[in-house]
Structures are given as structure tokens and as C-alpha cells.
Amino acid sequence: MNNEEELEEQETPIVSKNSEAAENILEQVIYNTNDTFKKTYDFRRELGITVDISIKMPNAFERATLVKEQVGLFDELFAYVDPANRIIYDTLTLIEKFGKYKVYKYTNDKDIDGNPVINKQEIPDYFSMKRFPREDLVTQIWQDYQEWRSRFLG
């Protein structure tokens, strides 16, 4: 093998520029297609609900606007809000601004013939600040989101 052939062989990329794999990698890195946390929670046994949620990870500017909004909720008292409540408000604000979700309530019922039937009903605005959902659910979402987010922070 002469030097030209060796050089040509070394310059050949493992993944060609036009391959589908290369395009997928570019989309993930450049176009932020992998910046969304997605998870389904099944709390039917405990609470009779399921939660399908996705949260887009905000960029630095968007994160700053979230903090500004949270400070606005508490005015001068923000520094005195305990960490557990900050987690709750941080998560609810994050879901409100960057999340999409469906929460379904399941109830046992009987049809006309008396046969058992499970009814599934969507609960709109479950994670709204006005409705204030259960703290344990919000905390679980925050923990899972932070674990997922840590993959990007090294």
C-alpha cells in the first residue's frame, strides 16, 4: 500500500456525511431533538391516576425567565422559601412553561348489566398552580427530571 492509499483510507470517516446516522446525530446535537424529558407514571394503585408528561429543557435565557417568575411569586420572601417548596414551585413553573401532560383518573364502575368497567377520564390542568397537585407527585417528577437533566451536565 503506498502513502496515497494509506492517506485516503485514513480520511474515510466511519460514518459518512450523508448517512442517516450522521443526520440523526446532527439533529440531536445541533437542533436539540433530544432536549425533552418524557415519562409515564402509573399511580393507579395508589391514587387511581396515570401521568404522561414531557418537559423541554429550557436554555439559559429561558431558565432565567423562570427564576424571575418564581421570584415574582414570592416578592421579597423568595430568599426565605424553604428548599422543598422551591422544588415544588420550580417544577410547576417548568411544567407550565415547557411541559405537556395528560393526567387520567381511573374509576371502577359497572355497566348496565352489572359487569365491572374501568372508566378513564382526563383531568385538565392537573399541574396548574391554581389546582396545586399532590406534592409527592411533583417531587417525583422533579427528581426524575433532574436525573435525566444531569446527563447533559457531565
Image (cartoon, rainbow, N blue to C red):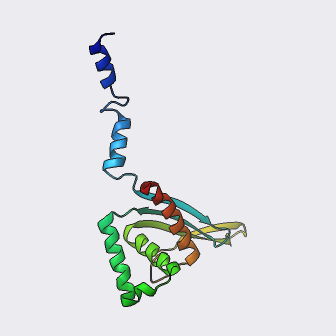
In the displayed orientation, state which residue is furthest to the right.
Answer: 114
Res 26 → quadrant: top left
In the displayed orientation, state which residue is furthest to the left.
Answer: 4
29 relative to 130 in the view: left or right: left
The image position of residue 76, as x and y in percent, is 37, 90
Quadrant of the image for the N terminus? top left
Q: Residue at x 53, y 63 (%)?
A: 144
Quadrant of the image for the C terminus? bottom left
Q: How many marks?
A: 0
Q: Residue at x 67, y 66 (%)?
A: 117
The image position of residue 146, as x and y in percent, is 49, 64
Pick the residue in front: 50 or 16.
Answer: 16
Pick the residue in front: 89 or 126.
Answer: 89
Q: Residue at x 37, y 51 (%)?
A: 33
Pick the residue in front: 148 or 24.
Answer: 148
The image position of residue 67, as x and y in percent, is 36, 76
In the displayed orientation, state which residue is furthest to the front.
Answer: 3
Above or below: residue 152 compared with residue 6: below
In the displayed orientation, state which residue is furthest to the top.
Answer: 1
31 relative to 42 in the view: left or right: left
Res 73 → quadrant: bottom left
130 relative to 9 in the view: left or right: right
The image position of residue 2, as x and y in percent, is 30, 10
